[in-house]
Amino acid sequence: MLDKDGHFLSHLLIRPPGIFTPHSLSYHTNTHRLWVGSVYNTKLCVYRYIARHDTLSDMNPASAGVMESLSVVPYKETKKHLQGDERLLKLMSTIELFNFFTRQGVDGCYHISCVISNLFWVSDADNLILADTTGFPLHHVDDLCRDLYGGSHTVTSESELFYIDRNYNINKLSKNMKTTTTIIEKKDSTWLPGCVYWSPSTRDLLVGMFREKILSGKVNRFNQSGQQTLTIQHDSTGLELYRYPNYITENNNGDVVVSDSDGAIVVTDREGRHRFSYTGHPSGSGLDPRGICTDVLSHILVCDVTDDTVHMLDKDGHFLSYLLTKSQDIDIPCSLSYDVNTHRLWVGSWYNNKVCVYRFTDRHDALTDEHIDRSDGEVFSCSSPAFK
């Protein structure tokens, strides 16, 4: 929105639910409402952003020109006692490169699933392999879905692998890698799974779904028996939240965190109520989100291939820092995985086969005593400040 002399006033809409990519506008002079059309679907939304003078005089001037129809369900923080690592860990002043290696058998690193501290599953567009920190492939899954470029696999606390196969079924590979079981069979040709995440807290499986012809998405929750218990698709006004869920994870408070291919991180609470959408720093500046994860301190970490960075947000969607900026360590960060045992961040590159492992949190006592021996090995090099 500009004034008559061309001065910028505000972003009137930022990635509006249901439309996502506004393309056409019409203003109705009788009702003073704004009609907005989408470029990618047949959705048309009508907004009101002008009120009577007597109404405006009672409003906060800072909010008088803001759209009224985009509401967010208020989030009530529940009191909880910090436990274990949450009490002991603190953000470091700089992020440190702990290890790096190249892995054989894949051309790019679209997604990483940590198994244990020296084993991980990694996939590109055609391959899903198990590798160790030497990069040597130990096992290859040959029926991975070839049409997905996001979070197509996830690992349980028992080291079992869930992945989307070439027929869009969701399979489970046993820990010994000898038994493959179809857990969720594709029954609806309209909706296809695009990403999966196994929840350590509920042991549920979160599945991001998409429609090919009419670009639209949703998140389904399945219990341990494979029964669907929840669908997250719309906000409180009935408009769609997702266009194409590409990566999915969960935060410590039960929030469902989705990296949507239409330029936003969409966060709902456990029951599916929309909390917020993050569209870059500053808001609306542009975001091309890829891999996403959360850490033990409830930060949300996401790769942005627009400027080759990793953003760090707090649990309420406020930007904190660029945890990683483009550097010699890794070219284009694309995939993330957080190791809950060592509290290290695994970062995979988009165009090559390099994986970097970083440390960005430390124990409180280690931060206050420079002479404490670090038990997790030598730090290879120093990268960018953790807060910038």
Image (spheres, rainbow, N blue to C red):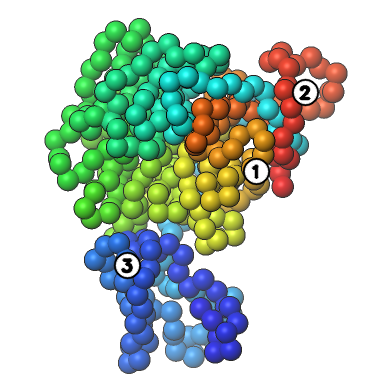
> What's the residue at 30%, 49% (across, down)?
217
Which is more foreground, mark 3 or mark 2? 3
Mark 3 sits on what residue? 38
> What's the residue at 52%, 46% (across, down)?
305
| Residue 366, numbered label | 2
Q: Could you tell me if residue 211 is visible in this image? A: yes
Q: Are circles 1 and 2 on residues that touch, CB within 8 Å? A: no
Q: Nearer the viewer, residue 156 or 153?
A: 153
- Asked if residue 92 lies left or right of residue 156, the reply is right
Mark 1 secondary-structure assignment: loop
Mark 1 sits on what residue? 325
Kind of residue at badge 3? Ser
Kind of residue at badge 1? Thr
The image quadrant that residue 96 belongs to is top right
Q: Residues within 10 Å of mark 2 (few under 14, many from 20)?
A: some
> What's the residue at 31%, 71% (across, down)?
37
Q: Residues within 10 Å of mark 3 (few under 14, many from 20)?
A: some
Sequence order check: which comes first, mark 3 or mark 2? 3
Sequence order check: which comes first, mark 1 or mark 3? 3
Which is more foreground, mark 1 or mark 2? 1
